[in-house]
Amino acid sequence: MIENNKLVLEILEKTGLSFFKLRNVFYSIPTNSCEISIIYPSNYNLTDVEREKVKSTIINYINLNNCKIIVKINKSFVEEDLIQNQIIKFLNKNYPVISSTINLSNIAIYIDSNEKVRIRFGLEEGLYNHFIKFNIDKFLIENLEKNFCANFEVNAVCYQKSKIEEEILTERVENLKRKSDLDALLHLSKDKYIVKDVKVIVGNEINFQPKHISSIKEPCEDCVIAGKISFLTERTFNSKRKKKNKDGTEEPIVKPYFNFTLRDSSASISAVIFPSKAKYHKMNLLSDGNEVLVRGRISKYNDKLEIFVKDISLCSLPSKNEVVTSVVESEITDYRYVKPVKYSSFKQSNLFESAKKLSKEVLNHTFVVYDFETTGINPVTDEIIEIGALKIVNGEFSEVFTTLVNPMRPIPPSATKVNRITDDMVANAYTINQVICDFYLFCKDCQMVGYNNIAFDSLFLINAGKRVGINFSNTQVDAFLLAKNKLLGLKNYKLSSVSKYLEVNLIDAHRALNDVLATAECFLKLY
């Protein structure tokens, strides 16, 4: 195992370059090779001599017999969009409660001339307390400083959340019209779609579904698209680095690259890839007419967008770039768009330390506690815009399923006033037709629990399933009805009131996952 501090000290002692950072180390057993990634500040011009000295220092320090050492040395560009992407990636992986609630407008980033980065989060009271309690600022700084050559400062600011009027909540429950219109039009995805039979050719596995090429309007750091290859051509360029000949003369190092056109049913884009020596021969596996899934950076060159490819996989494209509109339930065996995560950082308190003994019904069954946020109260004409769900196995919180959903229409101001979900927040989210299969798999063979779900959420669920041919026939348990039957004499039976009575912590109400966590604890105390 390579220790970061020792390696950095070794580089400093041998080269005098104190600003290098060890970003990551990857060891490949099949190839018996070790890849080490080093970064340095973008404002420093590293010479070829210094680069070679750093590489030799690292190779000598590691000293692994018969192991190929690959050292990659790259500039660390401290830019706002790169930092934003890393923050969102970190929160998505470690703190989905926060990432599903905030957007980029909640994050302010300031970069001074010395590449000192100050990051400020604007959070509502419940999320602010969660942020402070779990020292998220500390862990975020550690993550950022590992990925950038810069000093970071992270602060959170608490602001007062807007008061939600009682009439809006009452209208949501009491004025719900139970209608069934199974002829509702399907909304095809204008963004991402499904490809199959993915096989890695160059680079790493691509775990995301592609966008339509026509939907790409601006440069971006990380993009996944798919299409058919045409005009695949190998070319060469002269590297800035030079090689020394035996007679003492120098000449540029000639390196290969490939460019091709990638076309889907919506548009085409020029693509270029600069393969390493290890990956060069793999390009021979590709030819015109291949259907491929690629990942890379979108840039603008001569006023035209092109993609600098990092990873390529063979795939099978659908006949048209659209989502599946009819599925067979038995064929839903893998998560495609939204994968559940283990319940860990979501836990706000140890419910089971003080809870009464759980019933045999709870211990012998698997439950999924769920909640939807929607564009309105009509399950036929309105759309789901957020799903939150928690699986309970043998009385213990097991997995979490959470995602925003693109309704493919503007979100009414009245809905945003309740759940604070905006059009910008769902702009890049998947559609309900895409995620409903994943949610079906998550809920399969489980009893489903909600709060007023029988009169509200289950109706949206049934209609969303029928659009793509899925029948949600799960047993529905309504914690709202349990509360009314067991907690006699309460002034009202809203989730906030019942949670307060049962001493359950409800953080940031009217966001799907937050309501689910509170509903789950209330359910276990009531059932």
Image (cartoon, rainbow, N blue to C red):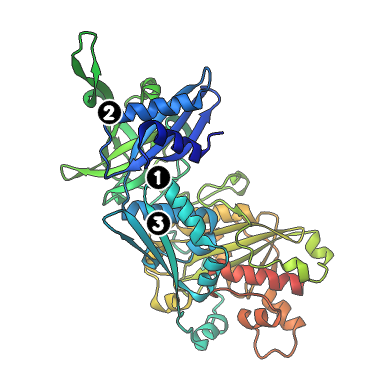
**Relative horizontal placement of residue 245, taking residue 73 as reference (left or right):** left
Quadrant position of residue 493:
bottom right
Say what secondary structure mark 3 lies in. Answer: strand
Mark 1 → mark 2, Cα distance in angstroms: 38 Å
- Residue pushed farthest top? 247
Residues packed near mark 2 inside 10 Å, few (<14), some (14 to 19) or many (20 plus): few
Quadrant position of residue 389:
bottom right
Residues packed near mark 3 inside 10 Å, few (<14), some (14 to 19) or many (20 plus): some
Report the amino acid beneath label 2. Answer: Asp
Report the amino acid beneath label 3. Answer: Phe
Q: Residue at x 53, y 80 (%)?
A: 172
Say what secondary structure mark 1 lies in. Answer: loop
Question: Can residue 409 be seen by looking at this rendering?
Answer: no
Say what secondary structure mark 2 lies in. Answer: helix
Marks 3 and 2 close (CB-CB < 8 Å): no
Q: Nearer the viewer, residue 253 or 92?
A: 253
Of the numbered discs 3 and 2, the one sitting upstream in the chain is 2
Residue position marked by numbered label 1 in the rendering: 210
Q: Residue at x 74, y 69 (%)?
A: 524
Q: Nearer the viewer, residue 369 or 25?
A: 25
Location of residue 161 in the rendering, given as x and y in whole percent from the top left corner = 46, 79
Quadrant position of residue 408:
bottom left
Mark 3 → mark 2, Cα distance in angstroms: 29 Å
Of the numbered discs 1 and 2, the one sitting upstream in the chain is 2
Where 466 falls versus 516 (above or below)?
above
Residue position marked by numbered label 3 in the rendering: 152
Q: Residue at x 43, y 51 (%)?
A: 144
**Relative horizontal placement of residue 440, taking residue 376 as reference (left or right):** right
Location of residue 213 in the rendering, given as x and y in whole percent from the top left corner = 31, 45
